[in-house]
Amino acid sequence: MVKKKRIVSKLILALVVLTAVSFCFLGSTFARYTSGGESTASVSVAEWNVSFEGDDVSAITFSQLSPAKDAWASETDGEERTHSTGSVKAITITNSGDVAADVTVTVGDIEVALRSSVSYGAGISSDALTNNASPEQVAGLFSVKLGYATTAAADTATATDEDGTITQTVAADGGVLVIFVEVIWTSADTEGQAVADAIDTWAGENVESVGFDVTYSAVQASELPTA
């Protein structure tokens, strides 16, 4: 009996030793290699920087405007007498940002201001030359033409648009769009000499000013990085 206990004790001791040895192997021979580290990353944001610059940004000012001094020619040739303020440099739009910009310039509706002592009438016709002009007859005398150039030093427009809207892509990093505005008086010559001259005369006597809004907007037209 004593002999069996000794054998059991030896077996337990041997098992403990083997277990300890196995832990040594697991802790060294079979361990995984591991490494670690940390990095920082950042990306610069493409700058959006479109400026609208010029002395007349808030109020584009013209000299006085009259109809053409030329005599009426003919109502059948489709030609109408016109006279203009000339093209006025209104604003310089500069894109100093990192992406291109689509710039849109739009002319609003023409607003005619009458002198305080007068009002519109039924309209001038060949049968009623002494009538007060109608709002449509007076508004029809005036139109606005936009022009533009793409160099900051430009004193005249290199292209024009008579539809009341200009849309141009202005390049990044210094692209420029210079806007010019022109007001034109077009006599109603297709209505006949007497009517045309009467409408022009009524406007000269009773219209105080002609105004309109010019609006500018810019939207992103390219992206970084490029595809």
Image: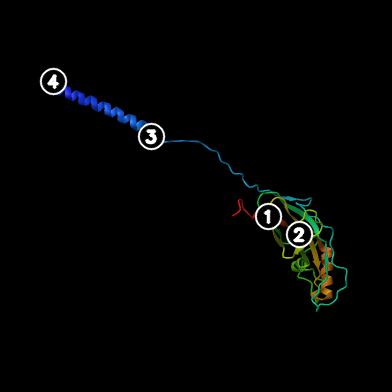
Which circle's residue, 2 or 1, is located before the other in the chain?
2
Q: Is 221 situated above or below 128?
A: above
Q: Are marks 4 and 3 in contact (CB under 8 Å)?
A: no
Q: Nearer the viewer, mark 2 or mark 1?
A: 2
At label 3, counting other C-alpha atoms closer than 10 Å, the crowd grade (few under 14, some 14-19, many 20 or more) is few
| Earlier sequence position, callout 3 versus callout 2 | 3
Amino acid type indicated by mark 1: Ser
- Distance from the alpha carbon under mark 4 to that under mark 3: 43 Å
Element class at badge 1: strand
- Which sits earlier in the primary sequence, circle 4 or circle 2? 4
10 Å crowding of disc 4: few (<14), some (14-19), many (20+): few
Can residue 156 be seen here?
Answer: yes
Look at mark 2 in the image and give the residue it sits on.
148
Residue type at numbered disc 4:
Val
Residue at (15%, 22%) from the top-left corner?
5
Residue picked out by circle 4: 2
Instruction: Provide the secondary structure element on which disc 2 rests.
Output: strand
Q: Quadrant of the N terminus?
A: top left
Q: Is residue 2 above or below residue 214?
A: above
Q: Where does the image place residue 152, in percent across and percent down from the top left?
A: 78, 53
Which is more N-terminal, label 1 or label 4?
4
Tell me which amino acid carries mark 3: Ala
